Image (cartoon, rainbow, N blue to C red):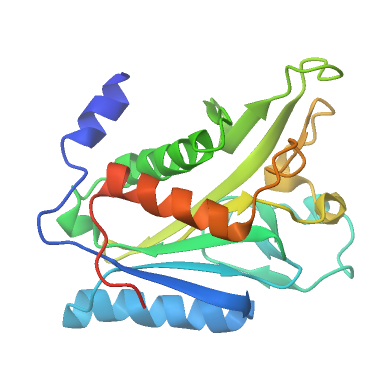
């Protein structure tokens, strides 16, 4: 285990923090989701509202993080583009991709943003392991990656999950996006996360030959969250 993992593990869980677990059916408008996230984050700090993990899907859209470059938006008229306060660069969201927004109180969880991002990565890695997918971190590349080692892989690495966070008054929002069965051609309208290397692309569980559903991933995410962050509370 790395020094980072050990350090984060020591402050990972709170005895009292048990976030609500929320799953929305259908497609959730991005602006609606952003408004609800910000309201919950503010209420957690100001009123002691429960933390929340919110699983949902968005209609096709691109979001621009705080480090995004205009030239990385290749087809600006293809889908709506939203400027967002999360870290990172351009990301695609759309049907078949599970979004997990996490509104957690870092004052109850070690007050360490670096460890929080590490734990988000670990959450994704452990969830993917339920499907026998080896998700990996890569130095200098945000998100979780899969090495294409099978026939035709040719040393290629593909991104299967994106991570983007924002922290306000020690409360987190935004979170992770895992590709289950999105239309991968939709990523062609951007340079995902600013990485244009020809040997790096995007993939999904279904693209890897796994007939998984959003529900299948939700079960894995719930189990992995409990391992990494601690127990959940009520389901809403």
In this rendering, the answer to whether 9 lies above or below 83 is above
Q: Number of numbered discs present?
A: 0
Q: Residue at x 23, y 50 (%)?
A: 230
Question: Residue 150: x and y, percent?
Answer: 77, 18
Q: Residue at x 18, y 61 (%)?
A: 17
In the depicted view, which residue is nearer to us: 224 or 68?
A: 224
In this rendering, the answer to whether 106 lies above or below 228 is below
In this rendering, the answer to whether 19 lies above or below 114 is below
Screen quadrant of the N terminus: top left
Question: Residue 199: x and y, percent?
Answer: 80, 25
Residue 234, picture quadrant: bottom left
In the depicted view, which residue is nearer to us: 11 or 160?
A: 160
> Is residue 42 rendered to the left or right of residue 196?
left
In the depicted view, which residue is nearer to us: 211 or 229?
A: 211
Q: Residue at x 54, y 52 (%)?
A: 217
Question: Residue 100: x and y, percent?
Answer: 49, 60
Screen quadrant of the C terminus: bottom left
Is residue 65 visible in the rendered structure shown here?
A: no
Question: Residue 15: x and y, percent?
Answer: 10, 55
> Is residue 31 rendered to the left or right of residue 103?
right
Is residue 60 visible in the rendered structure shown here?
A: yes
Residue 198, picture quadrant: top right
């Amino acid at each position: 285990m790395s020094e980072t993992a050990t350090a984060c593990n020591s402050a990972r869980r709170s005895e009292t923090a048990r976030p609500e677990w929320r799953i929305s059916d259908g497609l959730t408008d991005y602006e609606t989701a952003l408004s609800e996230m910000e309201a919950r984050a503010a209420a957690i700090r100001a009123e002691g509202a429960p933390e929340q993990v919110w699983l949902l899907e968005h209609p096709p859209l691109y979001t621009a993080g705080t480090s995004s470059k205009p030239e990385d938006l290749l087809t600006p008229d293809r889908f709506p583009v939203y400027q967002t306060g999360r870290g990172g660069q351009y990301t695609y969201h759309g049907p078949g991709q599970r979004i997990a927004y996490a509104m957690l109180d870092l004052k109850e969880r070690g007050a360490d943003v670096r460890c929080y991002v590490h734990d988000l990565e670990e959450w994704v890695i452990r969830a993917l392991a339920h499907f026998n997918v080896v998700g990996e971190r890569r130095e200098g590349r945000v998100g979780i990656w899969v090495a294409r080692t099978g026939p035709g892989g040719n040393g290629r690495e593909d991104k299967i999950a994106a991570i983007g966070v924002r922290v306000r008054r020690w409360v987190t929002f935004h979170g992770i996006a895992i590709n289950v069965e999105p239309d991968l051609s939709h990523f062609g309208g951007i340079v995902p996360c600013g990485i244009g290397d020809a040997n790096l692309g995007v993939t999904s569980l279904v693209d890897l030959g796994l007939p998984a559903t959003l529900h299948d991933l939700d079960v894995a995410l719930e189990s992995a969250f409990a391992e990494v962050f601690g127990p959940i509370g009520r389901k809403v």
